[in-house]
Image: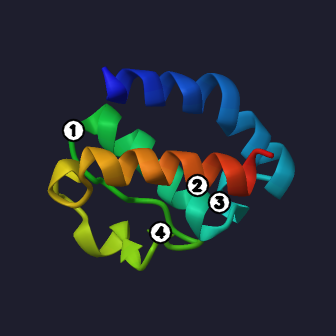
Amino acid sequence: MIAATYMEWWEKEVKDIIISQYGGLKKANSICQFARQIRNAFAHSKINITVEACSDPIWKGLNLLEHNGKNLTDLLTTADFINFWIEFEEAELT
């Protein structure tokens, strides 16, 4: 349920804001890339980063690029994920 809610939130509310704010998804900062890769990991059942020429997806020192192919749930607890979501909204959407 969390994954579906997050993906819908990203697609309907966030993606266009980030594109507008940074002039494209690849130009967004590392926390935006982290949020984007969480969306992708939920959609593809694992971390699968193929994007080049953009900031590494980093939050609190966790670089998802270093964990390509792993399950997101092996890296983030539900509490970590919720804390990230709150922090991302405060940092990028307010």
x 58%, y 72%: residue? 55
x 47%, y 69%: residue? 59
x 43%, y 40%: residue? 39
Q: Pointer 3 and pointer 2: residues touching (CB < 8 Å)?
A: no
Instruction: Check disc 4 and report its element: helix, strand or loop.
Output: strand
Q: In which quarter of the image is residue 16?
A: top right
Q: Earlier in the sequence, mark 2 or mark 4?
A: 4
- Numbered badge on residue 59: 4
Instruction: Check disc 1 and report its element: helix, strand or loop.
Output: loop
Q: What residue is pinned by disc 3?
A: 26
Q: Pointer 3 and pointer 1: residues touching (CB < 8 Å)?
A: no
Residue 27 lies, with reference to residue 62, above or below; the image says above
Identify which amino acid the numbered label 2 is placed on. Glu
Q: Distance between the residues labelled 3 and 1?
A: 22 Å
Residue 9 lies, with reference to residue 60, above or below; the image says above
| Closer to us: 48 or 11 | 11
